[in-house]
Amino acid sequence: MEDKKEQTFIAIKPDGVQRGLIGEIIKRFEMKGFKLVAMKMVHASKEHLEKHYEDLKGKPFFPTLIKYMSSGPVVAMVWEGEGVVKTGRVMLGETNPANSKPGTIRGDFCINVSKNIIHGSDSVESAKKEIALWFKDEMVKYDSCAFDWLYQAAVPIPTDQ
Ligand code: DAT
Ligand code: MG
């Protein structure tokens, strides 16, 4: 059974913040039906970002990536819902915006891989690691009134209508 409480770490990168895309990006996740369970603006340190991107340490673009990500505030968020990690990646588009389809966030709002405006966890495991790195006991607990409308089997239409 799918986990309706699956969580992913999404971050609007410094270029997304500067270009006024915060609302548009949040809107897409919200309208899809995912639930926002944590959000904050952070101007992350180089050390923090090196930890976040530790898997890419050997890549030639690593220093540029860290400089870019630490160049201004980011909007760090945790979104929850069935399949949110995989669907979140689909909503983001490909790493390189040039390969991202229109309708995706990177496909619609950016051009170059070094300024691709948004981060999203690539697996449930990395989501857990990233959420633990960015948020310490800052997750809120609440029931969404839309939950049943998103997940519950449809109620049959009465025959007298
Ligand atoms: P993603 O962000 O889609 O998960 P990734 O984890 O492979 O992609 O890389 C992290 C970020 O590093 C990516 O969003 C942008 C940057 N990056 C990746 N490949 C790059 C490249 N070839 N040149 C410049 N920056 C790159
Ligand atoms: Mg990645």
Image (cartoon, grey):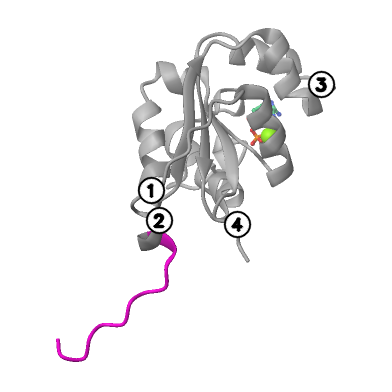
Q: Residue furthest right?
A: 58
Q: Which residue is mark 2?
A: 147
- Dot 3: few (<14), some (14–19), or many (≥20) neighbours within 10 Å? few
Q: CA distance from mark 1 to mark 4?
A: 16 Å
Please tell me which residue is depicted at 60% across the width and 29% down the height of the picture: 113
Task: Tell me the magenta residue range.
Answer: 150-161
In depth, the one of 68 and 125 nearer the eye is 125
Badge 2: few (under 14), some or many (20 or more) residues near its Cα, within 10 Å?
some
Precedes in sequence: disc 3 or disc 1:
3
Q: Disc number at residue 3? A: 4
How many other residues sit within 10 Å of disc 1, few (<14), some (14-19) or many (≥20)? few
Going by the image, does 137 lie left or right of 21?
Answer: right
Residue 81 on the magenta segment:
no
Mark 1 beta carbon near ligand 1 (under 8 Å) = no
The residue labelled by disc 1 is: 144
Instruction: Give left or right: position of 47 versus 116.
Output: right
Q: Say which element carries label 1.
A: loop
Q: What residue did someone put label 3 on?
A: 57
Q: Nearer the viewer, residue 80 or 141?
A: 141
The CA span between labels 2 and 1 is 5 Å
Q: Position of residue 55 (x, y in %)?
A: 80, 28
Whichever of callouts 3 and 2 sits on the residue coming sooner in the sequence is 3
| Amino acid carrying mark 2 in the image | Phe
Which mark is drawn over residue 131?
Answer: none
> Where, by quadrant of the figure, is residue 132 drawn?
top right
What is the CA distance from the residue labelled 3 to the residue labelled 1? 39 Å
> Residue 47 versus residue 161: which sits nearer the camera?
161
| Residue at left offset 73%, top offset 42% | 125
Quadrant position of ligand 2: top right
Instruction: Name the kind of residue labelled 1 in the image.
Output: Ser
